[in-house]
Amino acid sequence: MMESYAAFTTDPAGGNPAGVVRDAAALSDARMLAIAADLGYSETAFVTSRDGDRYRVRYFSPLTEIPFCGHATVATAVALGPGEHVFLTNAGEVPVTVDTHGVATLTSVPPRVEPLGADAVSALLAALRWAATDLDPGLPPRVAYAGAWHPILAVRGRERLADLDYDVPALKALMTEAGWTTVQLVFRADPQTFDVRDPFPVGGVYEDPATGAAAAALGGYLRELGLVADDATLTVRQGDDLGRPSRITVRLVPGEPGVRVSGHAVPIGQ
């Protein structure tokens, strides 16, 4: 049975929609991809097996399987109900806790942060139709991972995000070659608040309204570069420019390798 949830919102008309299939054991890879394509959401989660509170979960966009998806994880966990769950994903084990108010908190796999070379930055800027002067020197370009790889580019002004108009074929080709899932475009509104947009042409959609995996990667990036405290709670605002506001809470806990990502999820059309 297919279910639809909006993640990182309390409004079914906001957040990022995700498909959830809790009984996908009999589905082939081709069938899961076809279901995701027919649904048209940025991702659909498929639970292919269960052992107690441990679930094998796979994620498909309309065009391809991806290793990990944060918003579909939140949606699936809320669909499963309150309690502690462990999702076995292609990226590794992801524990998820759901409270009685429909808030799920996932803990990502340990993040990694690597340099983003000058040629890659130049190619990204060209595909985005941005200038190097648009970038915020206080948040240098990097590529970060917390289940999937996302280059991170930060801009000086919020209006640069609002005017997003990228070259879809060029960015898709660049991302495909590099193995990136989305591109995390960031504006730091205040020390704890970040406005972001995430192009996702490799998944068959122009942009993700909420990207939990990229939010976890952003948390790892900020911690690695010493741009936030080791003990920090951050707010990521996404989807506003698409008319689907999303609010993602990112929590960094001293001594905990993973990044915690929290948000509501609500059913759509139920």
Image (cartoon, helix red, strand yellow):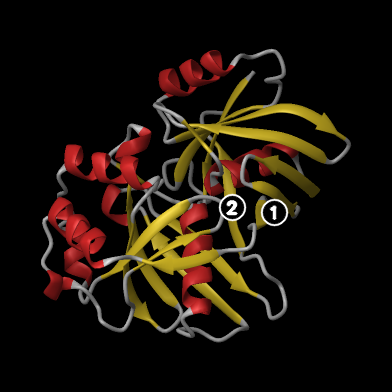
- Mark number displayed over residue 101: 1
Relative to 166, is 190 on the left or the right? Answer: right
Relative to 125, is 256 on the left or the right? Answer: right
| Residue 106 rendering spot, x and y as whole percentages | 66, 55
Q: Which residue is mark 2?
A: 264
Relative to 146, is 124 on the left or the right? Answer: left
| Residue 110 rendering spot, x and y as whole percentages | 63, 63
Q: Residue at x 35, y 53 (%)?
A: 239
Q: Are marks 1 and 2 in contact (CB under 8 Å)?
A: yes
Relative to 88, is 128 above or below? below
Q: How many marks?
A: 2
Q: Residue at x 59, y 52 (%)?
A: 264
Residue type at tag 2: His
Which dot, 1 or 2, sits closer to the camera? 2
Q: Secondary structure at mark 2?
A: strand
Relative to 47, is 91 above or below? below
Q: Quadrant of the N terminus?
A: top right
Residue type at tag 1: His
Relative to 156, is 74 on the left or the right? Answer: right
